Amino acid sequence: MLSWNEDCIIYKIENHSSNFDFNELPSSSFEQVTFSDINNELIEINYAWIDPVRIRDKIISKEQKEVTFWLFKNEKILCSFANSESTMSYAINKLGKILSFGYTRINPFDHWVKNYFKKNNWFAELISVHIKTTPSAFDNNEIKKISIKSLSEFNYKSLFDKHTVTNLTFSMNNTIFYIDSVSVISFPNTIKESDILKILSVVIKEFI
């Protein structure tokens, strides 16, 4: 079960030509990998471990961390879910060693900017952007949300030319999701798991 206040990063699996072997997954008091079939084409993998918190090389506490992955078997795509990029980076590296695969990170933000922002024909509609701003005496916010409907075509393209866009907000069949400038995908807390699956299933088709 996923927590939708967590972020998602997508990876393409490489250097792995056979089926995944889940028969000898590590399990101890410090590290555990479990899996379950969501359907015939999708496996949920959970990687959990104990992370020691150190100060001056002395362990002062231990924190349990975990990352959930969705493995799209036919596409050889992994979607990882956690509350920080560093946690996901650690977990994908460990999982790659456990299951013997290489991987590359997929960048839907760059892909969308390159292929779709000038011709609004993606599967989802862009409804707003967040941009970097210079704080002033009247407004100290560094990030500003702008509705696409309020922008002229010139201003719309200018935002991307100046590389000020930090986040994109999309709507697919009235379901909202977000992609930031480093290609982390996130979702509203109220979204259904089935809607997340629908969105990610379409996103990954762009990269297979």
Image (tube, grey):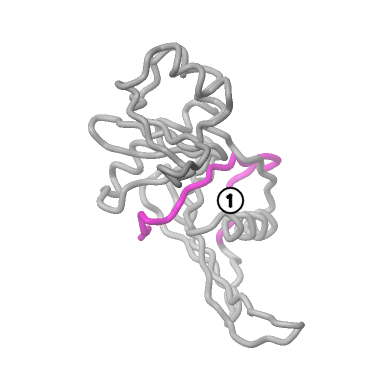
Q: Main secondary structure of the magenta part?
A: loop
Indicate the secondary structure of the residue bearing disc 1.
loop
From the viewer's side, name the closer residue of 5 and 139. Answer: 139
x, y percentage for residue 11? Answer: 58, 42
**In which quarter of the view is residue 28 placed?**
bottom right
The residue beneath circle 1 is 20
Q: Is residue 72 visible?
A: no
Image point 69% across, 45% down: which residue?
102
Quadrant location of the N terminus in the rendered image: bottom left
Image point 70% across, 57% down: which residue?
97
x, y percentage for residue 168? Answer: 43, 33
x, y percentage for residue 101? Answer: 68, 48
Q: Is residue 121 visible?
A: yes
From the viewer's side, name the closer residue of 32 and 88. Answer: 88
From the viewer's side, name the closer residue of 54 and 124. Answer: 54
Q: Can residue 2 be found in the magenta stretch?
A: yes
**In which quarter of the view is residue 110 placed?**
top right
Part of the protein shown in magenta: 1-22
Image point 54% across, 28% down: which residue?
207
